[in-house]
Amino acid sequence: MSATLKHIVLWKLKEQAEGADKASNAVKLKALLDSCADIVPGILKFEAVIAQPGLEATYDVILNAEFVSLEALEAYQAHPTHVAIRPFVGAVREARQCIDYLS
């Protein structure tokens, strides 16, 4: 059985950006991420979630994804649908953390 590549990204959003508040931008970011869920072959898991209000969280939105290979992750990152969401993400994020690892 071959290893899968885990790709986990966390975003902390600005209180206000792009004419909207953090909660609205979190919903939009999740929808944009969801639109990328099956854009390339080799995506095994793709889950975008918003932190639950009222529970402790230091980040607002997380992407938890798994790919069959580094090549599949690279294809996802280069895909026009993914590239198109980057300007919005850059405008609304205060901070970003990412980890990629083989499992």
Image: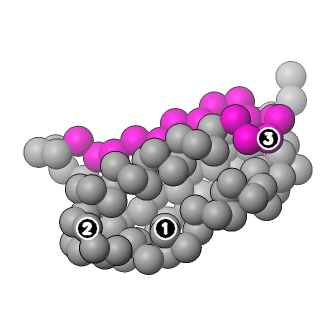
Q: In which quadrant will I find the N terminus?
A: top right
Q: Earlier in the sequence, mark 1 or mark 3?
A: 3
For mark 1, give the secondary structure: helix
Question: Pointers 1 and 3 in contact (CB under 8 A)?
Answer: no
Question: Pointers 1 and 2 in contact (CB under 8 A)?
Answer: no
**Label 2 Cα crowd, 10 Å radius (few <14 / some 14-19 / many 20+):** few
Residue 20: mark:
2
User: As displayed, is residue 65 above or below residue 2?
Assistant: below
**Label 3 Cα crowd, 10 Å radius (few <14 / some 14-19 / many 20+):** some
User: As displayed, is residue 20 above or below residue 64?
Assistant: below
**Looking at the picture, which amino acid does disc 2 mark?**
Ala
- Kindly give the residue lying farthest to the front in the view shown: 19
Q: Residue at x 27, y 56 (%)?
A: 24
Residue 63 makes an appearance in the image: no
x and y, in percent, of residue 78 in the image: 79, 61
For mark 2, give the secondary structure: strand
Closer to the camera in the image, 10 or 90: 90
Residue 9 makes an appearance in the image: yes
Question: Pointers 2 and 3 in contact (CB under 8 A)?
Answer: no
Q: Which residue is mark 3?
A: 40
For mark 3, give the secondary structure: loop
x and y, in percent, of residue 3 in the image: 80, 34
User: As displayed, is residue 18 above or below residue 59?
Assistant: below
**Looking at the picture, which amino acid does disc 1 mark?**
Val
Give the residues drawn in magenta, as a range: 38-52
Q: Which residue is mark 1?
A: 89
